[in-house]
Image (cartoon, grey):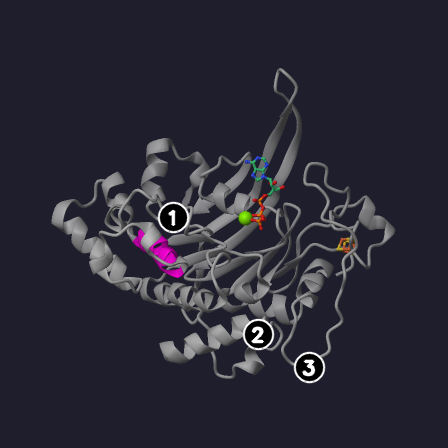
Amino acid sequence: MDARSRHAATKELLNARSLRFHSSTYPGATGPVAFMPDRAEPLLSVRNLKKYFPIRRGVFSRIAAYVKAVDDVGFDINKGETFGLVGESGCGKTTAGRAILRLIEPDAGTIRFDGVNLLQLRKHELRRKRRDMQLIFQDPYASLNPRMTIRSIVGEPFAIHRLAGGLEREHRVADLLNIVGLDPAMMNRYPHEFSGGQRQRIGIARALALKPKLIVADEPVSALDVSIQAQIINLLADLQQQFGLTYLFISHAIPVIEHISTRIGVMYLGKLVEVGTSAQICLAPKHPYTQALLSAVPTPDPAAKKRRIVLRGEVPTPINPPSGCRFHTRCPIAVERCKTEEPPLRQIEAGRDVSCHLV
Ligand SMILES: Nc1ncnc2c1ncn2[C@@H]1O[C@H](COP(=O)(O)OP(=O)(O)OP(=O)(O)O)[C@@H](O)[C@H]1O
Ligand code: SF4
Ligand SMILES: [Mg+2]
């Protein structure tokens, strides 16, 4: 599929907000995840990751409780694939992404990246490793320093890591701007002179500067207009193919996640409740929470009647999550056992893990 027709398909897909008709609506559309992941060895292997934020109260700032933002999360990401992390607001997606990059210190777990446990690295070793792991932010307005030119913003990683200076840096910045579809002649301008989509391209150019292996993209299109979302998603997909990148793609929007991901992890209240391929999760979800999430996505096909699963109540607080299965207070099929016994995330078929007593 050429870039233009893929762009049209992506735009249509995002507009359609469709999940279940992904393949049938766009026959022959391989989607942007054509790069074949290398399953021989995961690039990233996360196990038992925990991040609890202390809540301090009183004059002595004593710890009164913890926000269990990420509570025993584990998954693998193979080289060249896109692992989509999805779930409602506050379920711990951003915390997980930042803890993996050690932008916040995890409380427990192992994070094996490219053969080393990141949690055992000392500061200077981590600094070197950081070149291989980059973050793309949600808000291209807030993430770029308004007082820096694009030349300085995109060139900053070279300065920080003392990799290129002078004319060489200038050439590299120009190359990066070309790669993300921006005119290098604009490199002396400031962020406010660019549109939202262009600013996100600048953020992507900066993330690519040090030729990373892994990019954590945290809601990279959520702040953008739908037509621009499609362009940025296609750019990320093209870059993945061009440079063999691996993505951890975080989003609350299932159509976006479905479109870009090879595999998907669904989070609820700090835990993964289901992990599988994009098709397994989106065409035949097993966990009641995944089923409810998917049922809320409108389909464009009026003939395809879907039963909307309306969840009871609000998401409980991660400060004091429900006992047993954390989803039991809202689960439409909960049984007595769910209140006391926590279901482990277990494999139910090749490549698919679910945490539910009834699956
Ligand atoms: N620095 C912090 N201190 C205390 N609590 C925090 C901190 N950062 C996040 N939290 C809490 O941790 C939980 C998980 O937050 P997180 O931002 O990871 O969720 P999210 O899934 O990324 O949500 P969203 O979709 O809204 O971005 C939330 O309850 C949030 O309020
Ligand atoms: S374990 Fe029980 S409460 Fe949890 S998802 Fe399964 S049926 Fe629902
Ligand atoms: Mg977030």
Query: Where residue 251 sits in the image (x, y, percent)?
Result: 54, 57
The tag earlier along the polypeptide, 3 or 2, is 2
**Cβ of disc 3 within 8 Å of ligand 1?**
no
Query: Where residue 290 sits in the image (x, y, percent)?
Result: 68, 61
Q: Amino acid at mark 2?
A: Ala
Q: Read off the residue under disc 1.
A: 133
Q: CA distance from mark 2 to mark 1?
A: 33 Å
**Label 3 neighbour load within 10 Å: few <14, some 14-19, many 20+:** few
Query: Where residue 284 sits in the image (x, y, percent)?
Result: 66, 70
Q: Which residues are the magenta region?
A: 197-208
Which residue is painted at 29% across and 50% down in the image?
Answer: 190
Looking at the image, residue 321 lies above or below residue 273: above
Q: In the figure, is residue 296 to the left or right of 149? A: right
Looking at the image, residue 306 lies above or below residue 343: below
Which residue is painted at 79% across and 55% down in the image?
Answer: 312
Residue sitting nearer the eye, 304 or 115:
304
Looking at the image, residue 45 lies above or below residue 294: above
Q: Is residue 185 visible?
A: yes
Outermost residue to the top:
60
User: How many marks are shown on the rendered structure?
Assistant: 3
Numbered badge on residue 65: none
Label 2: state its secondary structure.
helix
Label 1: state its secondary structure.
strand
Q: Read off the residue under disc 3.
A: 302
**Label 1 neighbour load within 10 Å: few <14, some 14-19, many 20+:** many
The tag earlier along the polypeptide, 1 or 3, is 1
Q: Read off the residue under disc 2.
A: 16
Which image quadrant is residue 241 in? bottom left
